[in-house]
C-alpha cells in the first residue's frame, strides 16, 4: 500500500504559525520542537492540519455550515482567521459529505457500517450524531491517526453512545482483509466516504475502488472528493471529466454522479469563494454484489444442489 503514502492536493488555507514556546522548560521545549518540526516536515501532517484549520475557521463563522468542536486541537492557537463571507469549496464539500452520511444511515434499514477514507484527522466519528449501534471504520495513515487520537483524547472527545470506532491503517498490506478482521460484513449495507485520503497516483485510487467494490454490498453508497489531477495521469484516450469519472467508476460496478460545489453552495443559500480548488465532488452507488454476497449465494446454491431443494433454489 506504499503507493498511497504521498501528499496529494491539500485544501488551500491560511498559513499556520508555530506556537510560542517562551514559557516552556528547556526539556519540554526541545522535545516539543522536535515533534513539531517533524510534523511540519511531514506532508501528511501538513495536509491534515490544513484541512482541520478550514473546519476550525468555518466553525467560528457567525452562521457556520457545520460545527467541528475538535478541529481546534489540531491547529495553532495563533491561526490567522479568514472570515470572508464566501465559503471555501472544502467546507462546502465537507457539509455535503456530512449530510449524505447522516441521511443515508438514518433512512436505509440495517445500514450500520460507515467507512471513512481520511487524512487521519477526520472528526466525523465524534462530531456527527450517529444512530445507535453505528460501526465506524477509519482508514488513514497510522502515524497521523495516532497523533490525532492523542489530541482528541486530551480534549475529551467522546463517541455517540453505543457506537463503535475502529481504525485500519492505510499502510495495511491487505485492506480488504484488515477491514474484515475488524468486523466489516459485506452481507450488510454500508456507506463509504473519501475526503483527504493521501493519493499519489491513479492506480492508488483504482486500488481503493477495488476494495470498496469487493466489500460493499450492492446498493451501498460511496461519496466524497477526488483530486482532479488524477484524470491527467490517465494515459488512455482523453475525455471530459464526466466521461472519465463514469468510465472509472463503471468499470468497478458503480453508478456515479458528479456534484458541482457551486450548486451545493447555492442550495444552501451561500456564495462560493473564487479560489482555485481542483477536487471533484461525487456520489456513487454500488451496483454489484460484494464478495461476501457472492460467497453466500454460492454456499446456498451448493446446499440446494446437494439437497435437491428446488423450493430453496427458487428463493434465490
Image (tube, grey):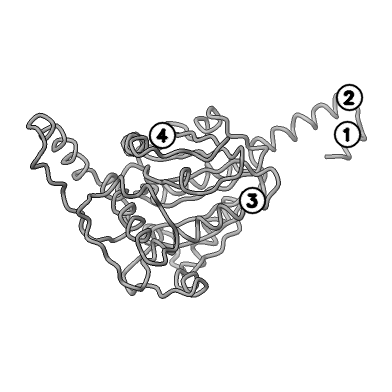
Residue shown at the point (56%, 45%) measured from the top left: 130
Q: Element type at marker 2?
A: helix
User: Horizontal and vertical percent for residue 39?
Assistant: 22, 41
Vertical comparison of 291 with 57: above or below: above
Label 3 or label 1, whichever lies nearer to me, is 3
Image disc number at residue 307: 2
Image disc number at residue 170: none
Quick one: label 2 or label 3, which is nearer the N terminus?
3
Label 4 or label 1, whichever lies nearer to me, is 4
Residue shown at the point (53%, 29%) measured from the top left: 182
Q: In the rendered image, which residue does mark 1 sit on?
A: 312
Q: Element type at marker 1?
A: helix
Q: In the rendered image, which residue does mark 3 sit on?
A: 106
Label 1 – label 2 distance at C-alpha = 10 Å
Observer-nearest of 308 and 103: 103
Neighbourhood count class around disc 2 (C-alpha, 10 Å): few under 14, some 14–19, many 20 upward: few
Amino acid at each position: 500500500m506504499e503507493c498511497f503514502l504521498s501528499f496529494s492536493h491539500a485544501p488551500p488555507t491560511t498559513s499556520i504559525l508555530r506556537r510560542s514556546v517562551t514559557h516552556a522548560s528547556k526539556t519540554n521545549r526541545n522535545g516539543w520542537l522536535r515533534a513539531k518540526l517533524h510534523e511540519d516536515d511531514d506532508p501528511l501532517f501538513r495536509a491534515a492540519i490544513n484541512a482541520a484549520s478550514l473546519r476550525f475557521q468555518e466553525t467560528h463563522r457567525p452562521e457556520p455550515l457545520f460545527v467541528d468542536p475538535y478541529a481546534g486541537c489540531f491547529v495553532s492557537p495563533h491561526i490567522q482567521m479568514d472570515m470572508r463571507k464566501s465559503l471555501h469549496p472544502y467546507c462546502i464539500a465537507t457539509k455535503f459529505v456530512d449530510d449524505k452520511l447522516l441521511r443515508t444511515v438514518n433512512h436505509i434499514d440495517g445500514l450500520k457500517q460507515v467507512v471513512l477514507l481520511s487524512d487521519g484527522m477526520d472528526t466525523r466519528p465524534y462530531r456527527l450524531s450517529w444512530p445507535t449501534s453505528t460501526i465506524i471504520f477509519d482508514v488513514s495513515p497510522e502515524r497521523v491517526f495516532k497523533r490525532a487520537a492523542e489530541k482528541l483524547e486530551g480534549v475529551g472527545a467522546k463517541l455517540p453512545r453505543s457506537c463503535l470506532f475502529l481504525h485500519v491503517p492505510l499502510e495495511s498490506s491487505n485492506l480488504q482483509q484488515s477491514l474484515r478482521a475488524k468486523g466489516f460484513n459485506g452481507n450488510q449495507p454500508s456507506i463509504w466516504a473519501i475526503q483527504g485520503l493521501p493519493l499519489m497516483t491513479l492506480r492508488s485510487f483504482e486500488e481503493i475502488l477495488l476494495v470498496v467494490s469487493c466489500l460493499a454490498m450492492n446498493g451501498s453508497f460511496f461519496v466524497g472528493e477526488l483530486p482532479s489531477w488524477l484524470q491527467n495521469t490517465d494515459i488512455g484516450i482523453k475525455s471530459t471529466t464526466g466521461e472519465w469519472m463514469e468510465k472509472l467508476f463503471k468499470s468497478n460496478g458503480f453508478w456515479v454522479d458528479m456534484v458541482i460545489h457551486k450548486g451545493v453552495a447555492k442550495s444552501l443559500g451561500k456564495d462560493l469563494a473564487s479560489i482555485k480548488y481542483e477536487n471533484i465532488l461525487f456520489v456513487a452507488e454500488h451496483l454489484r454484489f460484494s464478495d461476501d454476497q457472492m460467497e453466500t449465494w454460492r454456499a446456498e446454491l451448493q446446499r440446494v444442489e446437494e439437497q435437491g431443494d428446488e423450493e430453496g433454489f427458487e428463493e434465490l
